[in-house]
Amino acid sequence: MTTTAQQGTTRRTPAWCLVGRGTREAVTVVELDADGSELETRDVPSAQWPEHVRHAEEEAGPRWVWSDTATWYPRLLAAGVTVSRCHDLRLIHVILRHSQLVGDAGRLREATAWDAPIDQALEEPARGATLFDLDDSSRSGGVPHALEEARAEFARQRTATDGAADPGRLRLLLAAESAGALVAAELHAAGIPWDVAEHDRILTEALGPRPGTGQTPSRMAEAAAEVRTALGDPMLGIDSPPKLLRALHRAEIDVESTSQWELMEHDHPAIDPLLRYKKMSRLLAANGWAWLEEWVEEGRYRPVYVPGGVVTGRWAASGGGALQIPRQLRPALRADAGWRLVSADVSQLEPRVLAAMSGDRAMAEAGADRDLYSGIVDAGVVETRQEAKVGVLGALYGGTTGDSGRVVPRLRRNFPEAMRLVDDAAATGERGGTVSTWLGRSSPAPEAEWTRAQTGANLPDAAAREQERARRAARDRGRFTRNFVVQGTAAEWALSWLAALRLALARFEPVPETDAATASGPVFAARAHLVFFLHDEVIVHAPAAQAEAAASAILSSADAAGRLLFPGSVVDFPLDLTITERSPTK
């Protein structure tokens, strides 16, 4: 062991623990105080690493600084060890490198190994590899894990954050992003309780009995036969878009593609069975029997979440499709015997975030203690809830035609501050500028090709076609930046909600071993824990005796997230909450 602490002096409690690969057999841990001054450095044998972390958590609860949560944390969870806080260098590098709040970010602006794409960085660890399985390069997916590289990056990040225009706000974002990384790893470790028999029943009901290898389920085959008959082509390859499109044209069905929305506009005997076939085909491909065998084991579905996988800060998934589970499969999400599923989703999260960001009191009052869309109707802005919903979504996503184009001007008159915020964001994007979320995540700069197109369209000899193409591209970017500021801030609210809820659930007392959900693993088998997250929805798997307490924790954590991001705001974030044994379809 190497130490920088002087003998005979009182040991100071570390605020940070920077970790990195020292040798193949050891992890090097550097303890730092709140100012970043080094207190002690030690090499921990890899076999003792989980126990070292457990002891440090009990003694000091430091913030662990590591290259990549998805690489470092799974081994700790497998050993029954959790950490309360971390600083994920990879995720935070991405935020700081692009944030408008950061002025001179120094080398953070340069392309380095820390810019490895998130899905690439997660590729090996997410499917079971750990830090100690990696080769001597001490990297996975291009992300550095060696101590000195982590130390240098941490120093750059602290300098960038300390010098930011609003360091307090930015630090909140960085903490929330890192907490999200811990949650993602824990969700994978605990898994979603999954009823294989129910899943098989749903598939059989929708598609027919499971077919043999290479065969088509019976209901799909029947729908395909109806399509071929209706189109007069008994040998039609329905799964081939070009062949299907030609057959549709021969039947005088004038479509430019085989998309569901375009097909629905036509009245022909082939349309209904074709839409049924396409729906069944999607279910079979995305969540059929092959998916069940690959992703569900011992009653748990363990998808791979990717925090920050979308530029707005929303999560993505690199395996298992957790963010695209179809409604009809929700009943397969079933609590263990003696446990409950506590589900909650936020009502109209993004419009409420817009009201809070903009300080638009009229919009806040429209959603106070009630459905916001109904409140807009009660305020006399529109006549129906559907109109209100279409109009608000048009405001968020830049809808300018149809019902959106008709309702949005009314929203501008009644909610001027809210509409000004998104209109200004759109105008900035159309000019090629970048915008930022409430806490400081900034949109990416336009690509060089976009900039060249805009420049060329302003030249005296620019063709009308080039000018129109540039205007269309500018509008597209404006719609992106319009939504970025709201969707990204909603993601920040959700991360804050998750972080608070995670810590609240960690304080629950364990249940007796006989009542444990053993498939959830050593950390989560004996207490309520998060099992699912989707943008504005969470599901907690809780012992029946803890279900009500878990529901209270969900509610109080949502309230805390609102007060943390928008102190003093009158905007509330109401939840639809249920306690059930089986997840209902939504």
Image: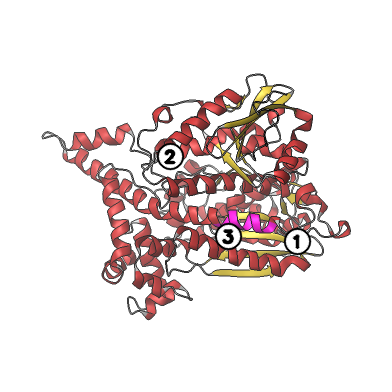
| Vertical relation: 511 (above or below) 572 | above
Residue that badge 1 annotates: 335
Residue that badge 3 annotates: 537
Three-letter code for the amino acid on which mark 1 is drawn: Ala
| Vertical relation: 228 (above or below) 330 | above
Instruction: Name the one closer to the observer, 20 or 194.
Output: 20
Residue depicted at 25% across the width and 32% down the height:
452
Magenta stretch: give its range.
497-505
| Label 1 to label 2: alpha-carbon separation | 45 Å
Residue depicted at 66% across the width and 67% down the height:
551
498 magenta-colored: yes
Q: Would residue 532 be visible to someone looking at this image?
A: yes
| Label 3 to label 2: alpha-carbon separation | 33 Å
Residue depicted at 26% across the width and 67% down the height:
409
58 on left or right of 494: right
223 on left or right of 442: right
Residue 501 position, x and y percent, is 62, 58
Furthest-front residue in this view: 8
Q: Earlier in the sequence, mark 1 or mark 2?
A: 2
Quarter of the picture containing the N terminus is top right
Three-letter code for the amino acid on which mark 2 is drawn: Asp
Q: Earlier in the sequence, mark 3 or mark 1?
A: 1
Residue that badge 2 annotates: 162
Residue 44 position, x and y percent, is 73, 28
533 magenta-colored: no
Three-letter code for the amino acid on which mark 3 is drawn: Glu
Within 10 Å of the Cα at label 1, are there few (<14), some (14-19), or many (20+) other Cα atoms?
many
